[in-house]
Amino acid sequence: MPERTNNNQNRSYSDNRNRSSSNNPAQGRQDATGDRQRKYEEFAWALAYLSEGSPTDPNPFNSREPVIQAIGEIWFTLLELSPKRGVNIKPLYRIGIGKSNRKLITRIKRRIGFNDLASSSERILEDCLMEIVTKQEFRFVNWFNKASLVTSRMHAFKLLPGIGTTHLENLIAERSRVNFTSFEDIASRTKVSDPKKLIIARIMRELTNPEEKYRLFSRKP
């Protein structure tokens, strides 16, 4: 049976950030903090099970194999996975894809871009991001506590949609007084209406625009 999410999921984030590799298609990127270490994705969330194979598979239709389109939960890497025989994954299931926890897949088939997603995967993508961000709230709240300049003139906060000068000043002033503890805390103290939705909107922008210059949360395709 597919692996369901659990309360220990958030704790895995810190461990996942410390794993590295040089030959995995799901490995990492340089993030907004300047971290150049290459990373594994240890877990991914299913977007769609495609019994007739990927829509962009160049092989003849009758020779295609089933794939799972999924998104990594740390670097938001879009992936196609080869499921084990008899496995039919439903959307929003959390799947182990690290070398030691592949209970449902045989291999990571390839990295893909947003334009490679099946229509069913595209429709569920924002819901999947909502699940990931909600269940790892501490991780993204911590980002608000640590975000800094991305250039000498621009703060990372300004890359979030809808964040203007007043919001920027409020965010910096409030976190200087005491660290944020939750999305609700951020909203109540800074008048940023829905920090979670801002994070999701920013991730979507990075995923849908391969030419995006600044990447706060995702790796470059």
Image: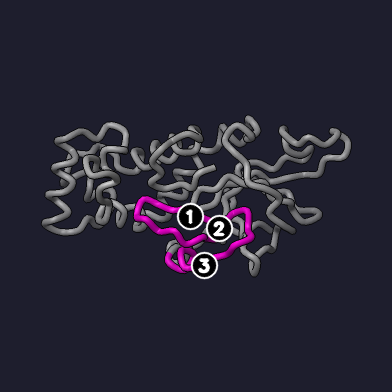
**Does residue 83 appear to the left or right of 70 in the view shown?**
right
**Callout 1: SS:** loop
Res 13 label: none
Residue located at (60% from left, 31% from top): 115
Residue lying farthest to the front in this orientation: 152
**Does residue 93 appear to the left or right of 132 in the view shown?**
right
* Of pointers 1 and 3, the one earlier in the residue sequence: 3
**Callout 2: SS:** loop
**Mark 2 and mark 1: Cα distance apart in space:** 7 Å
Q: How many numbered marks have been drawn onto this rendered protein structure?
A: 3
Closer to the camera in the image, 198 or 9:
198
**Does residue 20 appear to the left or right of 90 in the view shown?**
left
Residue located at (58% from left, 44% from top): 78
Res 74 label: 1
Examine the residues drawn in magenta and state their main secondary structure.
Answer: loop
Q: Mark 2 points at which residue?
A: 41
**Callout 3: SS:** loop
* Of pointers 2 and 1, the one earlier in the residue sequence: 2
Residue 5 drawn at (x, y percent): 53, 58
Circle 1 crowding by C-alpha within 10 Å: few under 14, some 14–19, many from 20: many
Residue 34 drawn at (x, y percent): 37, 55
The segment highlighted magenta reads 14-39
Q: Verify CB contact (< 8 Å) between mark 1 and mark 3.
A: no
In this view, 134 is above or below 123 = below
Residue located at (15% from left, 59% from top): 178
Residue lying farthest to the right in this orientation: 62
Residue 136 drawn at (x, y percent): 41, 55
Could you say which quadrant of the image residue 27 lies in? bottom right
